[in-house]
Amino acid sequence: MAQGSAISVETVSKRFGNGRAALDGVSLEVERGEFLSVVGASGSGKTTLLRLINRLDDPSAGTIRLGGVDAASLDPVALRRRIGYVFQEVGLFPHMTVAENIAITPRLLGWERARIDSRVEELLDLVRLDANFRTRLPHELSGGERQRVGVARALAAAPETVLMDEPFAALDPLTREALGQDYRTLHEKLGLTTLMITHDMVEALSLADRIAVLRAGTLVAQGRPAAMIDHAHPYVHELMESPRKLARRVDALLAAREC
Ligand SMILES: Nc1ncnc2c1ncn2[C@@H]1O[C@H](COP(=O)(O)OP(=O)(O)O)[C@@H](O)[C@H]1O
Ligand SMILES: [Mg+2]
């Protein structure tokens, strides 16, 4: 394992029942302070990978280390309080206010009321929501606002590492872009280690320091965003086709305008 890795996944496989492995010999490292994006189609094993890292489930083979320590030796509940998790479907509790949703982990950790209140205020500011959102219920928020609350909740107890499962996938493109960029700014400002899963190569290219491509449970490529553009693997090439077409179309429009 490389020194300084926040997350180290070492030849990890996961089988459910008799089917093909959901993950098959996956190895990857996320360095401290790094923003790694894992890109893959639906069913490629992305959520399974995050669940194993967060110990919501255990690998069938292989080892996961967090800060150099075998995750299997850590208490799962304590571990999950140290790692922020942003869910695919947000998962706010519908009958709890925004403030109560954000305060879930601090409350479990037994923080005092005044400390929780000031932390909620600070977090709303961090995710750029007005303080009057505190008392709102999730159904009174837009999709983008809900996911901002999801991010605030994940950051509540000041974790060093944040796992994100297709966090912005359900949002319209403009909102997704704004939230992605805002999160990237937070990642820098708070010195976080982020592992973000997405099915969208464009999102990964615009946010991540490094990209890993997952296909049917196997990692087929890893590298800097620029390395994905001309990557030799046919599947990476296929994933790059749509962003490339988009770029060509925009170039053509710009060229036509200049004529
Ligand atoms: N609890 C489970 N029991 C059985 N099969 C599962 C379970 N969770 C995931 N799978 C299977 O593992 C594969 C990967 O699923 P998942 O990690 O959710 O993919 P992704 O998040 O990339 O869409 C799928 O074929 C899925 O059906
Ligand atoms: Mg998933």
Image (cartoon, helix red, strand yellow):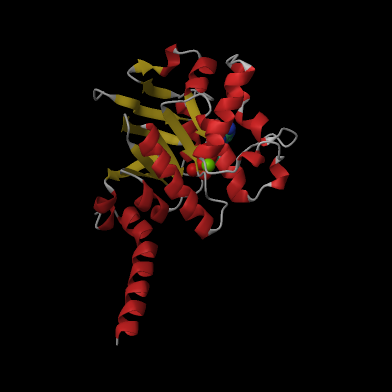
Quarter of the picture holding the N terminus: top left
What residue do we see at 48% from left, 53% from top? 178
Viewer-side residue, 125 vs 30 = 125
Q: In the rendered image of this protein, does residue 217 appear above or below residue 57? A: below
Q: In the rendered image of this protein, does residue 156 appear above or below residue 235? A: above
What residue do we see at 59% from left, 23% from top? 116
What residue do we see at 63% from left, 37% from top? 91
Residue 112: horizontal and vertical position, in percent? Answer: 61, 15
In the picture as drawn, the residue positioned furthest to the right comes out as 95
What is the count of numbered marks? 0
Residue 26: horizontal and vertical position, in percent? Answer: 36, 33
What residue do we see at 34% from left, 26% from top? 6
Viewer-side residue, 9 vs 187 = 187
Decide if residue 159 is in sight here. Answer: yes
Q: In the rendered image of this protein, does residue 136 appear above or below residue 156? A: below
Viewer-side residue, 95 vs 190 = 190
Quarter of the picture holding the C terminus: bottom left
Viewer-side residue, 243 vs 122 = 122
Decide if residue 198 is in sight here. Answer: no
Residue 135: horizontal and vertical position, in percent? Answer: 70, 36
